[in-house]
Amino acid sequence: ATAELESYLEFAIHLAKLAGPVILEGFNTRFSPERSALLVKKGNTADLVTEWDQKVEKLVRKEITEKMKGHSFIGEETVAAGETCILTDAPTWIVDPIDGTTNFVHGFPFVAISIGLTIGQEPVVGVIYNPILNQLFTAVKGQGAYLSKIDENPREQGRRLPLSYPHPAPPLPSLSMALIASEYGSDRSTDVIDPKVKSMRNLASRYPSNLTPGRAVGHAHGIRCLGSATMNMMALAQGQVDVYWEVGCWEWDVCAGIVIVREAGGIVVDSCGRKVNDGELLIGRRFLVVRGCCGEDGDTSPEASLAAQMKIVQ
Ligand code: LIP
């Protein structure tokens, strides 16, 4: 089974190599005269899609359909175009051709293709490639996660994740010592934005002490929004942020990232800190990733975890 997963990893890297130059070309020519044709309207003014998203997804989907007979495909733009995609137990490639489309349009360099594979609804292979920064993140379930350049062999020339501290990631006892990634997301309806802003406010000021008796309470070190779910997850996998919390992610935003984060020692739960099965995690749109899952003084109870602390700020 491992050899089979390794061959899927190689295939996913091949897809990243096909897509990377196309994304880069779009990124570098977005101010050309053809720029007027760049934006295709999707949802609201904060929910962007470009011709490049569609072009990259078409390219990748064609390759998967031709080379991986019997496998299913779920892609952001395919779903946006009206195809219904149901996650089954079959091997399923889940792809976001350009995650961080708003960044792509503005030239903010946190842009990546995200290629995940699920088998039995479990994410088992993840490849995330940011061609602007030439960062290739790869992982196979049980085989570790790596960061390399696109033309390097990830395991021989790449670096094992996380980078900033030894593997596995040591736990962090309190949100008051954490750097947290989150996003406003593209759904700007007040019933989505208001609770998010309230949670960010609670993190930035003081989260309610009466709900955490005996625990360290205070301000989080900071909040970062990179504008891309995959790049936020890769910041966590590298050891640069401690929590990534978001309500509103789709399966193509998180599938590849789940494998890489887990292989880097992180924990993926729903946005309230509950452990849910992978199928539910992928389609649930509520999402939380934390490094290490234990509290102060080595307390490993679920109540003590960063995830539990995140629950109380919401
Ligand atoms: C985006 C995510 C972002 C999230 C948005 C959206 P896109 O993906 O990466 O973090 O907040 O809701 O899903 O549209 O750039 O592929």
Image: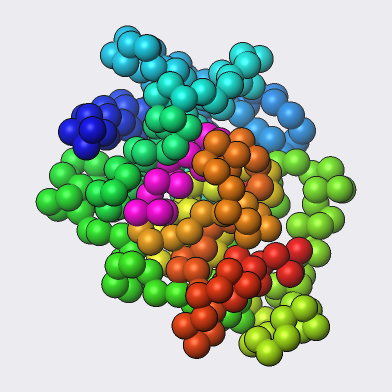
Quarter of the rendering occupied by the C terminus: bottom right
Residue 128, above or below 42? below
Q: Residue farthest to the right? A: 190
Across and down, in percent, residue 158 comes to 20, 53
Decide which of 314, 253 is in the foreground and name it.
314
| Magenta span includes 259 | yes
Q: Residue at x 33, y 67 (%)?
A: 168
Q: Position of residue 221 (x, y in %)?
A: 59, 78
Identity of the residue drawn at 80% across and 52% down: 193
Who is closer to the viewer here, 188 or 24?
188
In the figure, is residue 257 to the left or right of 221? left
Asked whether the viewer can see residue 157, the reply is yes
Q: Relative to residue 103, is residue 310 drawn left or right?
A: right
* Quarter location, residue 312: bottom right
In the image, what residue occupies the spot 23% across and 58% down? Answer: 159
Q: As displayed, is residue 36 above or below residue 206?
A: above
Relative image position of residue 52 (x, y in whole percent): 50, 25
Which residue in the rendered view is the most extreme toward the front?
Answer: 301
Q: Does 48 sit left or right of 299 as displayed?
A: right
Where does the N terminus fall, quadrant-wise?
Answer: top left
Residue 102 visible within the image: no
Residue at position x 45%, y 68% from top? Answer: 292
Is the magenta region chiefly helix, strand or loop? helix
Chain part drawn in magenta: 251-263
